[in-house]
Image (cartoon, rainbow, N blue to C red):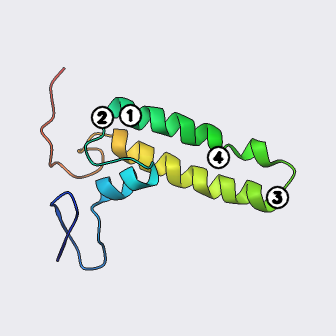
């Protein structure tokens, strides 16, 4: 077993836990707030919008892949731990 930089145990094939990996995709640190996550997502979404690369098919395809990675990381970070199948955080009742 390996240990992620945040202190969580990860399997032998990984060096980061899923949360830290998602934060890295968005260029964020482990102590990031949800507001910072949303702000980084919006900036990266605008930056990698495939429509900006209409004149270059290869760049457009690369932007589409990058946007999928960014969106996946954002969805992981903003979903509840139960939705991710990782009940490691207490859920607050509304």
Q: Nearer the viewer, mark 3 or mark 1?
A: 1
Say which residue appears at 72% left-offset and 47% top-offset.
50
Q: Which residue was labeled with disc 1?
A: 36
Alpha carbons under labels 3 and 2: distance apart: 36 Å
Alpha carbons under labels 4 and 3: distance apart: 14 Å
Disc 4 residue crowd, few under 14, some 14–19, many 20+, Cα 10 Å:
many
Residue at the far top in the pictured view: 94
Q: Nearer the viewer, mark 3 or mark 2?
A: 2
Alpha carbons under labels 3 and 1: distance apart: 32 Å
Residues under numbered marks 1 and 2 in contact, where contact means CB atoms less than 8 Å apart: yes
Q: Which mark is residue 57?
A: 3
Q: Which mark is residue 33?
A: 2
Disc 3 residue crowd, few under 14, some 14–19, many 20+, Cα 10 Å:
few
Q: Which residue was labeled with disc 4?
A: 48
As helix, strand or loop, the secondary structure at mark 1 comes to: helix
Disc 2 residue crowd, few under 14, some 14–19, many 20+, Cα 10 Å:
few
Residue 14, quarter of picture:
bottom left
Say which residue appears at 15% left-offset and 28% top-offset.
92
Disc 1 residue crowd, few under 14, some 14–19, many 20+, Cα 10 Å:
some
The front one of 23 and 90 is 23
Q: Is residue 19 above or below residue 81?
A: below
């Amino acid at each position: 077993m390996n240990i992620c930089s945040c202190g969580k145990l990860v399997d032998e094939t990984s060096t980061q836990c899923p949360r830290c990996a998602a934060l890295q995709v968005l260029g964020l640190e482990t102590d990031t707030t949800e507001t910072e996550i949303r702000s980084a997502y919006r900036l990266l979404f605008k930056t990698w919008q495939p429509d900006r690369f209409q004149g270059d098919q290869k760049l457009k395809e690369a932007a589409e892949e990058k946007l999928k990675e960014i969106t996946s990381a954002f969805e992981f970070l903003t979903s509840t731990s139960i939705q991710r199948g990782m009940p490691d955080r207490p859920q607050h009742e509304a």
